[in-house]
Image (cartoon, rainbow, N blue to C red):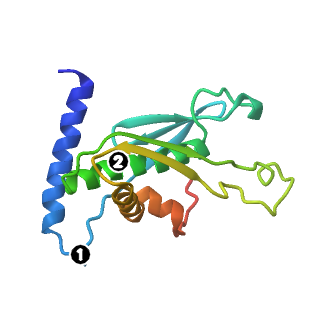
Amino acid sequence: MSDMKRAQIIILLVICLGETMFAQLDSTKTMPYKVRAEIREVKNRILECNVRNHTVLVDQPRAFGADDTAPTPPEMLAVAYGSCIASSIQFLASQRKLEVSDISVIVEGSVDFARAMGMNDKTRAGFPSLHARISFKAPMSNREKQELVEDVLRVGAVIDNVRNNTSIDYEIVD
């Protein structure tokens, strides 16, 4: 069995188990999913990010003095946002027993590095906006697709973090 097929089966099992769990949940209860990401500098500007048993590298472009071996943090945010849209479509479609296939999400936005370069503190340091182009095949009207996407935008975790303020605190440890 190929790794891709094995991953698809595992995802399907997780979705099925999730459906059973969600069906039993009271809407006033929560179902926390604890996330822990560990990030450390590897060399030059390359960062190694570990979450569960996965490793992702983050880097910067050569123009910023880096090696350009991996996506930048803003690019990773765009990836997280787009993949949250796609996986939330998959999840809701499975939950609702909808036939959805060929999901594609393209996320675009621009970051102005003027603030990081100390040139302008009036612009945002991050994306002022993100635009997602969402495509999928389903035996649904355009209105039904629109309603599904609106539901996706309400329930996706990363989508929620991008669309709404998230309280962030920190501590410096030695």
Residue 106 vs residue 160, the one in the foreground? 106
Where, by quadrant of the figure, is residue 173 drawn? bottom right
**Mark 1 nearby-residue class (10 Å; few <14, some 14–19, many ≥20):** few
Instruction: Give percent across and percent down for residue 84.
Output: 41, 50
Quarter assignment of residue 103: top left
What amino acid type is highlighted by mark number 2?
Answer: Ser
Residue 152 lies left or right of residue 131; in this view the side is left
Residue nearer the viewer, 39 or 3:
3
Which percent across, then down, holds residue 1? 17, 21
Query: Dot 1: what SS?
Result: loop
Residue at point 52% right, 64% down?
A: 163
Relative horizontal placement of residue 146, taking residue 41 as reference (left or right): left
Q: Earlier in the sequence, mark 2 or mark 1?
A: 1
Rounded to the nearest angstrom, the CA distance separating label 2 from label 1 is 21 Å
Farthest residue toward the bottom? Answer: 28
Q: Is residue 139 above or below residue 4?
A: below
Q: Nearer the viewer, residue 52 or 83?
A: 83
Which amino acid type is marked by label 1?
A: Ser
Residue 44 x %, y %? 66, 30
- The residue indicated by pointer 1 is 27
Q: Quick one: SS at disc 2?
A: helix
